[in-house]
Each structure stands twice: as C-alpha cells, then as structure tokens.
Amino acid sequence: MPADAPLKLVIFDVDGTLIDSQNFIVAAMDRAFAITGLPAPAREATLGIVGLSLPQAMMALVPGATATVVDGLVHHYKESFVELRRQTGGEAGAPFYPGARDAIERLDRAGWLLSIATGKARRGLDHMLDSHGLRRFFVGTQTADDAPSKPHPGMVLNCLAATGVEARRAVMVGDTEFDIAMARAAGARAVGVAWGYHARERLAAAGAEVIVDDFAALDAALEAVTAA
C-alpha cells in the first residue's frame, strides 16, 4: 500500500470467523444449563446467539429469565469454558478455519490495519491471541468487556477512533447477522463469511455487501467494498 494511501482497516470477529469453537461453546452452554438446573437449549439455538455478549445471549436463550438466573448462567458458562479448554489443551478444540492465519499475515503484509471485535470476554480473547502468537498483528481489540453487546456499534466505533480510519474504509468481517448489523450501524462496510454460525440469508438480510466462501476470496472482497 503506497505511503500516501488512505488507511484501511479490517475488523475481524473471532468465534465462527477465525476459529471454529462451536464444540467448546455448545459443551460449555450445556454444562452451564445443567448446573443451573435448566434444560439445555438445542445446538442450533446455542450457535444462533454466538457473537452476542453473554448476558444478552442468555436472555435470548431463556426469555423472561430473572437477573439471578442470567448471572448464574453467565458465571457457569465462563467457568465451564475455561475448564473445557484446560482439559483439551485449548487450541485443539478450537482450531483456526482453513486459511485464517494465512489471511491475517497476508493482509498485514499488504498494509491493512487489523483489529478484532468479539463477544468474547477479555480473558478469553487474550488467551487465544497469546496461545497462537497473534497479538502483534492487531492494532486494537474490542471485547464484551469494552463496549455494549453486538449489534450495538460501540466496538466498531472504538476501533475507528483508535486508528483514525474513516468508517467507509473499514470493513467488519464476521459470520453472524450481529457482526453485519454492528458494522452497518457504525457506517462501516461489511463482509460476511459463509462457514460460520448464521446462514447466508441472514447475513445478506443484515446488510452484508459480499459473502465469501473461503479466506482465499477475502482480499478481493475487501478491496471491492472499500473501493465502492
């Protein structure tokens, strides 16, 4: 990228976009509901709320739940997730999607600024970045501890403020309608990925400008939406 070219930013979601953590997520959710004494949600329901911050996710799974029940589910989910990660060695149970790491390195070399906006807690994101040696690639990270839950635009707005990139030159890359709606609410561009937890139809309805089928197609999609 030429030295005088406008800055461009890619903001990645994590679960369902960069890493395939669905088995961890479902197992931890099942444990949390069992400890709380509630019937576990269907797998599809659990994966459908991935991307939301945990309190919002629990309220979606248990409509009308009291604050005490929601707090309990959040606590037991977090503890169960950490325990599952310890038991399995972590990364083996939540691998990168094919091409994800190569795409991060390739975009970094091409001069894109890279950030993260995830519904994970700060502790979980830090563990992922450090265990995979990825921290050096990202100029900023936003978690459920830093801004309101997706689809509120706060995470994207924080990424823009931290980098000084114009919203029209920033692209959110995510696998759920929450990622896409968050980006559009912030005035940023939005690219959906087809390998995650929400169907293509949901991504398109939320405003995804392009939906890619693999990471090999991501670079061209990013150039296309920021040139429009």
Image (spheres, rainbow, N blue to C red):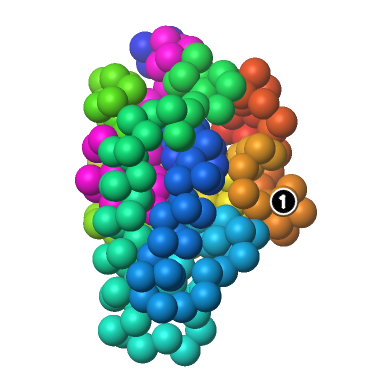
Residue drawn at x 66%, y 37% as measured from the top left: 195
Q: Position of residue 129 (x, y in %)?
A: 30, 30
Mark 1 falls on what kind of element?
loop
| Residue that protrudes farthest toward the right in the picture | 201
Q: Examine the rendered structure and indicate whether residue 45 appears above or below residue 82.
A: below
Number of residues whose C-alpha sits closer than 10 Å to that of mark 1, classed few (under 14), some (14–19) or many (20 or more):
some
Residue 153 visible within the image: no
61 displayed left or right of 92: right
136 displayed left or right of 108: left
Quadrant location of the C terminus in the rendered image: top right
Total of numbered circles in the picture? 1
Q: Examine the rendered structure and indicate whether residue 52 appears above or below residue 212.
A: below
Residue 30 visible within the image: yes
Q: Mark 1 points at which residue?
A: 199
| In magenta stretch: residue 58 | no
Q: Position of residue 106 (x, y in %)?
A: 48, 13
Quadrant location of the N terminus in the rendered image: top left
Residue drawn at x 51%, y 54% as measured from the top left: 26
Front-most of 107 and 165?
107
Residue drawn at x 57%, y 56% as measured from the top left: 47
123 displayed left or right of 70: left
Q: Examine the rendered structure and indicate whether residue 223 appears above or below residue 102.
A: below
| Bounds of the magenta segment | 105-127
Q: Where is residue 221 in the image (x, y as percent from the top left)?
A: 65, 28
| In magenta stretch: residue 119 | yes
Front-most of 210 and 44?
44
Q: Where is residue 115 in the image (x, y as percent from the top left)?
A: 36, 35
Tag 1: amino acid: Ala
**Rendering quarter of residue 216:** top right
Q: Examine the rendered structure and indicate whether residue 208 appears above or below residue 62.
A: above
